[in-house]
Amino acid sequence: MTLQAHQLSCIQGDRILFEELDFSVKAGELLLIEGQNGCGKTTLLKTLATIRQIDAGKILWNNQSITKLSDDYRDQLTWLGHLNGIKLDLTAAENLKISCTLNGLSVSDLAVMEALEEMGLYGYEDLPVRVLSQGQKRRTALAYLLLSQTLIWILDEPFVALDVKAVKLLQKVITKHVEQGGIVILTTHQEVGLDTGRIQRLRLTR
């Protein structure tokens, strides 16, 4: 299981964010995208997640174009961007159930509660998300990772708004996914507790 980019480029207006990128990430590895603000990190992640079209070059999943694979590729990945993608008037539990339903997952109420508890939201499951802190809202969104069953996680600054305890918790979740053969591609200023043999780094320059 390998995700590859060949001669990948991104053009925004009349500006080239990055060009001719070549990299590959295999099952059981984490790819950390680094670089200054404005260098194209989020754009690259959105391109890999098919949220944004490829400007030039190609992206392959197991030697097949993700454009041709279409939904067969998208079914393999979970995307989490800067926005949490949760509905403020619903409870944390209701948000998770809806996310699972929209992604074709059948999960029990117990599984939802266990995911929220693992993310440190025990006792907050039935409160409207609008009354939760920013960190708790982020935890609600991140709890979906525990239910997603996808191989590829593409995460844009997943540690934003999290306190120290939550950061350590998410590090463990990411580490477990990689150690179980998953692929994680992310941007972050936090260190993730994996041995160096499982981490690749790709630095974008302006």
Image (spheres, grey):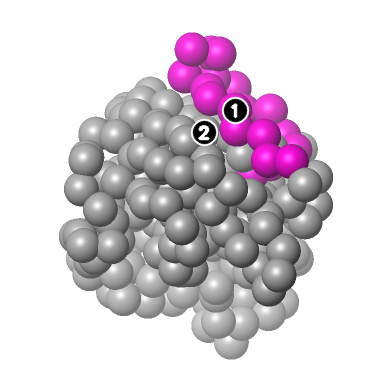
Q: How many numbered discs, if any?
A: 2
Residue beneath disc 2: 31
**Residue 191 lies in the magenta stretch:** yes
**Which one is in front, 182 or 134?**
182
Which of the 4 quarters of the picture holds residue 2? Answer: top left
Q: Earlier in the sequence, mark 2 or mark 1?
A: 2
Side (left or right) of 85 relative to 149 = right
Q: In the rendered structure, are the residues bearing label 2 and label 1 in contact, judged by CB atoms less than 8 Å apart?
A: yes
Residues under labels 2 and 1: Cα distance?
A: 6 Å
Give the structural element (helix, strand or loop) at label 2: strand
- Report x, y in % for residue 184: 46, 39
Give the structural element (helix, strand or loop) at label 1: strand
**Which one is in front, 35 or 160?**
35
Tell me what residue is drawn at x 61 percent, y 63 percent. 11
Q: Amino acid under label 2? A: Leu
Q: Which residues are magenta?
A: 187-205
Residue beneath disc 1: 201
Tell me what residue is drawn at x 66 percent, y 68 percent. 12
